[in-house]
């Protein structure tokens, strides 16, 4: 049986959930793909663990000091790197250093943090192309909500004219809790933090940056654009009060923080801001930490997806959906090689 070695860099809530879910699915990988998928290494900011024979769940609570940073990537001997560290779109780090090393070595990469992809997306794409490695980012691009998969597969061949997305669970949760439970901003934010889906610095959620990052990933990785954060106008929800929500409610409107992208005259324009929707609009019904995307295309009209998952397991599942796509692509590759050689 073929072996596929997987390493995980970034071992907080999502990294750990990904490790646990991967270990629980090993039998599935054997049966469906005929592949022994081994978790061979994990690391956090200052410590890690590696074993080429495969780590077990009960070993993962005791990382050893020192095994971290880009050297971890080569030391792991992995075929696939899953990167789940902090997201910093201003520097791309710490994920960027891991991904540059892994892609240069031809390791397939599954990226869950957004920072490196936003900061250096083009470089990463080019590096992957040059080394023949696969670069997957479902976890970063709104995780449990299908986004890039819709663009890459479901709408293949169509011209996307516009995208509108409730792409950030934290802000949707906050606005919903303020509207329906009369909760104040800070109390609602504490609940999102306790749920494990707010960013480590929640201003990245509330000021709209997380939505902007995801929108950029859709534009650049889904539609082939080359936008940077400077190309976007970004507004958050920090100025929203319970009183303002009440005023919208009196007019039958529901506020949402929305990333919007339009294609006009060959150019793609994107922005993030508050939009209000009448109750008849499906976006008005996207409650709690649900997310949603509406894509308008030339030939298939409007496509709408609404997704929710219990974090952080849902993000882990999105990353492992990418792993399944890598397993399928590897199987197809070896099939075509054996077809050619027979
Ligand atoms: N929590 C969620 O629902 C979702 C999170 N994400 C993204 O996933 C990533 C991880 O999120 P969480 O696990 O919730 O955050 P977390 O803060 O629990 O975990 C991040 C981990 O990375 C580690 N780390 C810091 N510097 C490192 C370095 N140089 N090398 C290796 N590890 C390092 C930290 O020690 C921490 O354990 C973030 O980038 C986040 O934006 C994406 C989708 C959903
Ligand atoms: N903080 C994000 C989670 C990761 O992308 C959110 O609230 O959606």
Image (tube, rainbow, N blue to C red):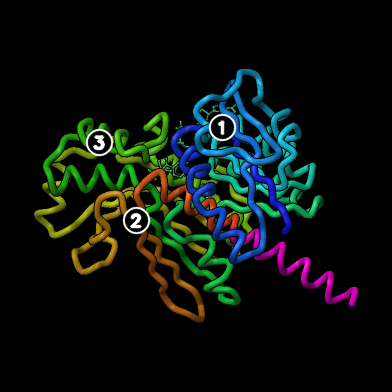
Depth order, front residue of 99/158: 99
Res. 90 mark: 1
Element assignment for label 2: loop
In this view, 104 is above or below 250: above
Residue under pointer 2: 308
Horizontal side of residue 209 vs 35, given as left or right: left
Element assignment for label 3: helix
Q: Position of residue 161 (x, y in %)?
A: 50, 69
Q: Which of marks 1 and 3 is nearer the N terminus?
A: 1
Depth order, front residue of 312/204: 312
Q: Tags 1 and 3 in contact by the CB under 8 Å rule?
A: no
Q: Position of residue 155 (x, y in %)?
A: 53, 73
Marks 3 and 2, how far apart in space? 16 Å
Residue at image position (36%, 37%) is 196
Residue at image position (47%, 65%) is 162
Residue under pointer 3: 191
Element assignment for label 1: loop
Main SS, magenta residues: helix
């Amino acid at each position: 049986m073929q072996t596929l070695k997987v390493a995980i860099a970034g071992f907080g809530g999502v990294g750990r959930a990904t490790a646990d879910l991967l270990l629980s699915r090993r039998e599935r990988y054997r049966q469906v793909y005929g592949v022994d998928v081994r978790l061979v290494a994990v690391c956090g900011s200052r410590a890690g663990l590696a074993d080429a024979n495969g780590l077990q769940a009960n070993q993962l609570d005791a990382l050893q000091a020192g095994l971290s940073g880009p050297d971890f990537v080569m030391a792991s001997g992995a075929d696939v790197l899953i990167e789940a560290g902090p997201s910093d779109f201003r520097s791309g780090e710490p994920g960027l250093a891991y991904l540059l090393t892994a892609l240069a070595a031809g390791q397939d990469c599954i990226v869950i943090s957004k920072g490196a992809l936003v900061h250096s997306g083009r470089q990463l794409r080019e590096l992957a192309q040059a080394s023949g490695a696969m670069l997957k980012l479902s976890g970063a691009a709104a995780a449990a909500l299908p986004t890039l998969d819709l663009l890459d597969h479901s709408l293949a061949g169509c011209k996307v004219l516009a995208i509108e997305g409730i792409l950030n669970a934290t802000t949707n949760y906050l606005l919903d809790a303020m509207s329906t439970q009369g909760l104040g901003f800070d109390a609602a934010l504490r609940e999102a933090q306790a749920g494990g889906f707010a960013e480590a610095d929640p201003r990245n959620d509330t000021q709209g940056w997380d939505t902007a990052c995801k929108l950029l990933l859709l534009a650049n990785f889904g539609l082939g654009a080359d936008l940077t954060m400077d190309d976007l106008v970004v507004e958050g929800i920090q100025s929203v009060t319970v009183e303002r929500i009440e005023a919208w409610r009196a007019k039958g409107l529901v506020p949402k923080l929305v990333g919007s992208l339009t294609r006009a005259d060959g150019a793609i324009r994107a922005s993030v801001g508050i939009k209000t929707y009448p109750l008849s609009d499906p976006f008005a019904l996207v409650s709690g930490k649900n997310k949603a995307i509406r894509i308008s295309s030339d030939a298939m009209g409007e496509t709408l997806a609404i997704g929710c998952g219990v974090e952080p397991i849902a993000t882990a599942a999105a990353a492992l959906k990418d792993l399944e796509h890598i397993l399928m692509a590897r199987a197809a590759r070896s099939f075509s090689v054996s077809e050619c050689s027979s």
